[in-house]
Image (spheres, rainbow, N blue to C red):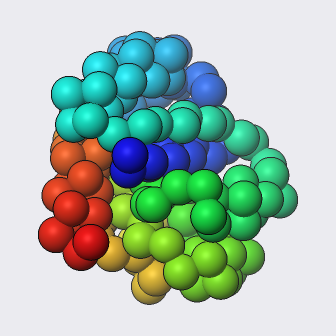
Amino acid sequence: MTSILILNGPNLNLLGTRQPEVYGSTTLNDIEHMCIATAKELGCALAFHQENSEGALVDLIHAARGTHDGIILNAGAYTHTSIALMDAISSVELPVIELHLSNTLAREEYRHTSYISKVALGIICGFGAAGYGHALRAMAQHLETSE
Ligand code: DQA
């Protein structure tokens, strides 16, 4: 069975109360439940994690090799700073979809740079919590056609 890992970076544990005008009022727990339902519909296994520290995210990306077939990554602010996450993705050679709730390109200039985009299969941003479902469907379809 195809297995997809969804990784969430710093401050995403605060979704629901964190700047709801930017990120919406859905909590990460709600998003996880939506993702579980979508993965079931798609016939995929799913793992869902959130970590605030960069090293923990690097470790989870390393551990994904041989365990999962693809990664959906909302790296939060590390998107704009982390060469370590970019290198981890290049090292494991798994397809990665970069995901953001907000449209980062329509926001502050420092959010326009993404180290993740350079090594990602594709990017989904600006659709709020629904973006997680879009990313899961896109990854499932990609994995199905690249088998
Ligand atoms: C975010 C966008 C990032 O710029 C920000 O630092 C986040 C959340 C998003 O999902 O819109 O923490 O990744």
Comparing 116 with 18, the one in front is 116
Task: In the rendered view, tell whether residue 130 sits above or below residue 96.
Answer: above
Res 144 visible: yes
Q: Residue at x 41, y 71 (%)?
A: 95
Say left or right for 60 vs 4. right
Q: Where is residue 50 in the image (x, y as percent from the top left)?
A: 64, 36
Tell how many labels. Answer: 0
Name the residue located 68 percent from the left edge and 75 percent from the top edge: 88
Q: Is residue 139 left or right of residue 66?
A: left
Residue drawn where x is 20% and y is 47% of the image: 137
Vertical position of residue 2 compared to residue 62: above or below: above
Residue 90 picture quarter: bottom right
Left or right: 18 as drawn, with respect to 137: right
Residue nearest the viewer, comparing 124 with 97? 97
Tell which residue pokes out farthest to the front in this image: 1
Q: Residue at x 65, y 83 (%)?
A: 91
Question: From the viewer's perspective, is 111 left or right of 130?
Answer: right
Residue 33: % across, % down: 40, 16
Residue 21 can be seen in this image: no
Q: In which quarter of the image is the C terminus?
A: bottom left
Image location (x, y in percent) of residue 41 = 20, 28
- How far from the left and from the top, in percent, is residue 114? 47, 74
Q: On screen, 70 above or below 24?
A: below
